[in-house]
Image (cartoon, rainbow, N blue to C red):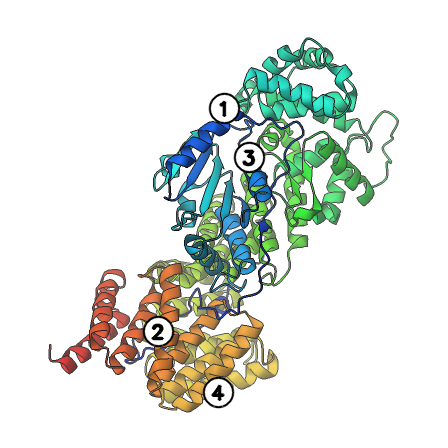
Amino acid sequence: MTARSGGTAVGGDASHNAFGPGSQIVDNRQTHIHHTPREVTWPLEIGAVPSLASAFQPRSALRERVDAARAQGASAVLTQVLSGGGGVGKSQLAAAYATDALQDGTDLVLWAPAVEVQQVVTLFAQAAVIVAAPGATGDDPEQDARALLSWLATTDRRWLVVLDDITDPTGMGPWWPASRTGTGWVLATTRLHDATLTGSGRRRVRVDVYTPDEAAAYLRTRLAEDDAGHLLDDTVDDLAAALGHLPLALGHAAAYMLNQDLTSEQYLALFHNRRLEHVLPETADAEGYGRQIATTLLLSLDAAQLTEPVGLAHPALQLAAHLDPAGHPHALWRTPAVLAHLTEHRALGPDLDEGAPDVTVEEVEAVLRVLHRYALINSDRRHEPRAVRVHALTARATREATPTGTLPSLAQAAADALLHLWPDPDLAHPTLAAALRSNTDSLHLHTGNHLWHPNGHRVLYRTGNSLLDAGFASAAVAHWETLSALSQQILGPEDTETLAIRNSLGTAYVQAARSAEAVTLLEAVVAGRKHILGPDCPDTLTSRNTLGLAYWQAGRTNDAVTLQEAVLADQERILGSQNAESLATRNNLAHSYWQAGRTNDAIILQEAVLADQERILGTEHRHTLTARNNLANSYWQAGRTNEAITLLEAVIADRERVLGTGHPDTLTARDNLGTAYWQAGRTNEAITLQEAVVYDLERILGREHAHTLTARNNLAATYWQAGRTSDAVTLLEAVVTDRERILGPNHPATLGARDNLAVVYREVGS
């Protein structure tokens, strides 16, 4: 079980309040990045632009409509949304435009799979670093992605961004690129007809199947290109009509005819004779992918199943179909779990006995090539970590035909394989981590509850922890909320695993600064663990520690101190004073002492914690760096400003090296350093640093996030010290208003901001 159950998940960082102790924060989500631009060689292609299919049809009439919609945009933001059913060729049309742009020397062509918003964010983040967008370093996906959007909006360079297969229009809302210079263009594809996809400069262009002439021309051209013109006869038009003029179905049929040396008349006969009822009931066609695609798919799959290595095509495609259509790592097929699954589910031919040897890596490589040759998958290692892709409709039809008895083994094998590939920690591998998260989500979605027997699979928890580590607080909350609901339903509300998942959800609430929800949930978790596990169980103790953090964040300092002192006494009695959980609780208790104004108590405890953590965990461990940051805060509060500055500057340097300049903990330390500069009278340096922090927080978390409010409060203090009284008053009035509405009028942070505003009012005689 790897759902987070301890207080160490948050880290306990704080940011001090320049006016006084009243608006500290647990952690922040983003940082301002100092980045030295790299040399960029133009033009650039970022993302895997799909190759145009053999015999691709230019679709002149459709392109005229797209071009007309684009021309109507004049110099405004140009976005066309290609909308239509599955398998009609939307992505291929977008790929044709991307290919044209590359040939025309467009400075940047970016192709982003958009099934999940996280995929878009991750690719945008990579692009930001590649184009040297100001503020991007590659350490923090969301900040880097926003840096790219800012660059796209203002650059004079020509660019095209393709968002392929949007499935979450609401989630995509903040991530639509714009061009204020008129040099950029966005092309999106989707099967949805959601109203949120249009407006704000976006125009829908409906895409339908090939015309009869285009469909017949595709078949003629495709077969002629392979010197197989002899397979064409006077039934070509009839075959195209039988396939509904669907580009995907036509592609399946052409690949089959070429591989099996069948004429169009022979294929048409097979198509009409193929009965689907025993593998694909009428009710299965719920998404409208069409009986044509289902039939062509199954014909091709049957042929692939009989091709060497015999018997592997079915189980291989079934497994791939339950993963993310946008692609998964090729290395997944070399994992022990997948090899064992294919061995178990290989369909033995008549000349093979029950003692057939285990499936080898070489055989897996061969079956991937077969599936690629039959146009059932696309396998290209140049596109890692999404080297193996399946068309969404091919995947859907395959899932519908997968026997239900296969799903338990398939789900466990795929989950084991994803977990096997997952680096720990994964912060240094953001692209791989994003691909593993999206594949886990797809697997969970398509296999129902099969990842919950006997308990939740560890890959589900690894995904949630990865989201927390990457700073995707909102996505982490959504993920853990889903797991919590499922666990309560499947395992029961008092199951120990359910309690662990709910504790992780509480941790996510704390990280997202949703203090009230964190307190309510964690109080219930503590009560449940006391009842089920007993008060002295380490899991119970760590839940109490996490609850203490939630109290601290909610401004209930006395409750936090009381609880953390009791937890620490119990942990030292049961686990020992040098245990990692005991050290974490001592750190958090010192934190609460600091918030309560008990600075000397905080310093004594923090210096002891720091010495122990350096000795036990090492000088560069994340928890050690947190302890040093918090000790610096206490030095600041005690008036030991120079010591605080020296320590914070060292903490920032270490965090930038160990965690990255964009890590949330790094931002917290930078915000603290700005306030220490303020106290030392280094006002200009403080303003420069704090304005950068506020800018990033507002852009990433929003103006009303608790962390942003703290940074705005501290910036107001520096404005006040610098004599910029009007700026200070304006900023503080907004902070007070926001805190009263969000935190309540009696929250310590609200009271602190009101006191600060009163001080400024007195100074100016208001």
Q: Give the CA separation, mark 1 to mark 4.
A: 74 Å
Q: Which residue is mark 2?
A: 24
Q: Which residue is mark 1?
A: 61
- Disc 1: CA contacts within 10 A as few (<14), some (14-19) or many (>=20): few
Residue furthest to the top in view is: 234
* Circles 1 and 2 in contact, beta carbons < 8 Å: no
Labelled disc at residue 607: 4
Q: Give the CA separation, mark 2 to mark 3.
A: 49 Å
Q: Nearer the viewer, mark 2 or mark 3?
A: 3
Tell me where residue 129 sits by quadrant. bottom right
Residue 582, position as x, y percentages in the image = 52, 76
Looking at the image, tell me whether mark 3 or mark 4 is earlier in sequence order: 3
Q: Which residue is mark 3?
A: 91
Looking at the image, tell me whether mark 1 or mark 2 is earlier in sequence order: 2
Residue 562 seen from this side: no
Q: Nearer the viewer, mark 4 or mark 2?
A: 2
The relative height of residue 138 versus residue 191 in the rendered view (above or below) is below
Looking at the image, tell me whether mark 2 or mark 3 is earlier in sequence order: 2
Type of the residue with mark 2: Gln
The relative height of residue 105 versus residue 703 in the rendered view (above or below) is above
Q: Give the CA separation, mark 4 to mark 2.
A: 20 Å
Looking at the image, tell me whether mark 4 or mark 2 is earlier in sequence order: 2
